[in-house]
Amino acid sequence: MAPANHSVFLCFSIFLIILLNSRPGIAQTRPVYACDTSSNPGLKNFSFCDTSLDVKTRVDDLVSRLTLPEKIGWLVNAAKGVSRLGIPNYEWWSEALHGVSYVGPGTKFSGLVPGATSFPQVILTAATFNESLFETIGKVVSTEARAMYNVGLAGLTFWSPNVNIFRDPRWGRGQETPGEDPLLSGKYGAAYVRGLQQTDDGDKDKLKVAACCKHYTAYDVDNWKGIQRYTFNALVTQQDLDDTFQPPFKSCVIDGNVASVMCSYNQVNGKPTCGDPDLLSGVIRGQWKLNGYIVTDCDSLNEMFNSQHYTKTAEETAALAMNSGLDLNCGDFLSKNAQSAVNKGLLNETVINKAVSNNFATMMRLGFFDGDPSKQLYGNLGPKDVCTAANQELAREVARQGIVLLKNAKGSLPLSPTAIKSLAVIGPNANVSHTMLGNYEGSPCKYTTPLQGLTASVATVYTPGCADVSCGTAQVDAAKKVAATADAVVLIMGSDQSIERESLDRVDITLPGQQKLLISEVANVSKGPVILVIMSGGGMDIQFAKDDPKISSILWVGFPGEAGGAAIADVVFGYYNPSGRLPMTWYPQSYADKVNMTDMNMRPDPATGYPGRTYRFYKGPTVFSFGDGLSYTDFSHILVEAPKMVSLALEDGHVCRSSSSACKSIDVVEESCTNLAFDVHMRVKNVGGMSGGHTVFLFSSPPQVHNAPQKHLLGFQKVNLASQEEGMVRFSVDVCKDLSLVDENGNKKVALGEHILHVGDLKHSLDLRI
Ligand SMILES: *[C@@H]1O[C@H](CO)[C@@H](O)[C@H](O)[C@H]1NC(C)=O
Ligand SMILES: *[C@@H]1O[C@H](CO)[C@@H](O)[C@H](O)[C@H]1NC(C)=O
Ligand SMILES: *[C@@H]1O[C@H](CO)[C@@H](O)[C@H](O)[C@H]1NC(C)=O
Ligand SMILES: *[C@@H]1O[C@H](CO)[C@@H](O)[C@H](O)[C@H]1NC(C)=O
Ligand SMILES: *[C@@H]1O[C@H](CO)[C@@H](O)[C@H](O)[C@H]1NC(C)=O
Ligand SMILES: *[C@@H]1O[C@H](CO)[C@@H](O)[C@H](O)[C@H]1NC(C)=O
């Protein structure tokens, strides 16, 4: 969203808001809502305002009272009020990717609420591999969002999270996502959505705020060498679609019960996603049974018509999208073209009724049609509930749980805050504040910069080393001077939004400019430990630092949010034992040189030398791998329980019974599949001297049929263990759900034969037989 060439639309809405706010006396401090029966008792006569009725009855009543132009007013994000029915204007577009955000015209900060808790950018939160934490963050964000709604500063519909797969390290928006693994992305999406949406009264029909999983689907090219997301046609195989790109969305809808899905800008196999009836009506609403609305990216329909030239007329685009199952348009394409599409007979009112009904049903579930919000469930929330001490502490906790320790020579980290008398703090990201937030940010409560965080424990000497992260000319001599006399050196390097962001994919995945030179030169003159901290969204080729014996430790801190500096210090000084793991592969630059970002194939192609993507398919060299991450302590695993063989019973006459040797796999739909599950139990022991958190990953390598992944994640669990403490980790594996794969045609299969289960260095062979 917020693309550059939509500035006309954006400026227009911002201008309007300023106008409204600058009129004395009407600066918003009250929420917008419909059915204000206390000031307009006549509204009591309308069934749609009657909270004792069910949502469908109320929606049907409302829609039956609206004229066609009034309905069309509710097909766009800047929805037009219907004053004769007591319905105000409503702005659908708010964002809350990692905290309530000012991106999107539905939310703004003011003197009343100057900031909201700014959690780490999602890629670092994913690195915590702490599923309950994902939901906890969502819950805090929705509380702050409701509090801001109550004083007229936010909407109720938030277009977050972003669950696209981080397929290529160059993607500028990879930072917004939970990484490259479909299972992790699905679990993150569903948990964050639950945190945002679930009300505390347990009423499943109600929504605290409405979340939105985006961008559906196979969207992960923004602007690479001039190839733009607005016109990019993603060529995706059915197999990759079904086992990589779709699973996070499916999990959002089915496991998270998300209230909305956003279709993307790009085409998939020649069809724009927002105009594809199979993807919208067929999959989202038909197969997954979305309870909510489908919205365009801002403004996908305009791109479909004006950039992709997909239809001859604007009315045809409007009709195609609506007839495909679209409900809401971010932008004004439908307010401009829906009526004439109806007039031309391309679009009928039944379809529009269905769309606005989905939109209104969502607003009903949010309580928008229940009258004065101050009398409702979250009516007591207000500015006092935003940026509370507990919420800000959670932001710091998420950052420290996410930070990944990638290298640690003996005796390097943690630094002793009493032994270190002087610490050199060097680098263009050492004294940054806004950079720590990443994109889709809001105004934070406050900042703790890395420099402030470190200076709270020891005396520091700071020099930036480069003017900015681009680091055109490194200030090597100044940095060396500071480093040479210090007991230890912390270099805080990496990127910011000028390097990787929405509408800007990278070409190089090395550190920008002369950062490498600065690091190597500084390390060479240092007499104590040298700690390299990479602040970035995507992975970096820092092989040189991994190999340099003078660089004793490496930390990746993502974009760590408002409390990032405090969390970095917590890890550096050992107040917190790092437990984060990489949610994406870190590739060497040679990968970026060789592979087209636009090649959507996940699977390698031996014929062309194409190496494939992510830990599931790519076998080439990596700088760091998915799941990498060290601790200040050590953990051991002992397998306690896992079957050696699992048998599938097949009914009489099944082809695989007569000639089982020819059978490589069986269909998951078959009855033999139901309720076939087993447990894997593991004892995990902290065998080191410091308490800490540990993520246990259960991977499986299936038999190599149907282009199966070389390995894939079945589950992960995180445990906290004191020094010498033992814990039990249990996975329940459903054979057909967890061990299955998708074949070339998108059918779910269970491969027969040897599946190798891996946990850490442990390997366990499991034979699946008939
Ligand atoms: C509401 O209904 C009552 C009773 O049917 C009627 O007397 C009143 O005029 C109605 N009010 C409005 C504003 O329609
Ligand atoms: C309206 O359009 C839809 C989609 O084209 C079609 O299935 C439906 O039959 C139409 N309904 C009416 C009443 O014309
Ligand atoms: C850190 O940055 C802030 C804001 O730009 C600036 O005011 C401050 O002087 C900087 N600190 C140092 C030690 O340079
Ligand atoms: C490291 O410093 C030594 C002198 O102490 C110098 O001879 C050498 O060239 C330096 N190496 C690098 C890579 O700068
Ligand atoms: C990369 O894409 C360009 C442009 O589409 C094409 O000419 C080139 O052959 C591709 N290279 C590889 C290695 O696939
Ligand atoms: C997950 O996060 C929660 C909330 O911060 C924390 O209490 C819990 O200890 C974490 N779990 C693990 C295993 O680290």
Image (tube, rainbow, N blue to C red):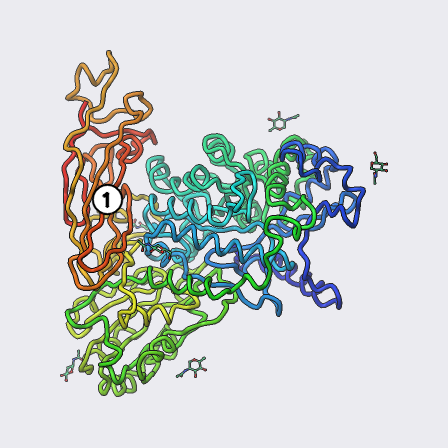
Residue at the (25%, 45%) spot, across then down: 616
Q: Which residue reaches farthest top? A: 653
Q: Is residue 4 left or right of residue 747?
A: right
- Label 1: few (<14), some (14–19) or many (≥20) C-alpha neighbours in 10 Å: some
Q: Position of residue 596 (x, y in %)?
A: 32, 52
Work out whether 557 lies above or below 695.
below
Residue 440 is situated, as x and y percent measured from the top left of the image, at 48, 60
Query: Does label 1 point to a residue whose CB lies under 8 Å from ligand 6?
Result: no
Instruction: Choose top left, top right, bottom left or bottom right for residue 396.
Output: bottom left
Establish if 101 lies above or below 64.
below
Q: Quadrant of the C terminus?
A: top left
Q: What is the x, y in percent for residue 413? A: 22, 71
Relative height, residue 675 to residue 105 (above, below)? above
Q: Which residue is mark 1?
A: 698
Residue 522 found in image quarter:
bottom left
- Residue 639 in the image: x percent, y percent? 16, 43
Tag 1: residue type?
Leu
Could you tell me how many numbered marks the image carries? 1
Task: Give the residue displayed 24% in from the left and 85% down from the top.
Answer: 486
The quarter of the rendering in which ligand 3 is drawn is bottom left
For numbered disc 1, what is the local secondary structure? strand
Compared with 656, 708 (above or below) is: below
Return the residue nearer the eye: 759 or 199.
Answer: 199
The quadrant holding residue 401 is bottom left
Q: Give the camera-side residue of 154 and 1.
A: 154
* Left or right for 361, reference 504: right
Q: Is residue 643 visible?
A: yes
- Determine if residue 346 is in view: no
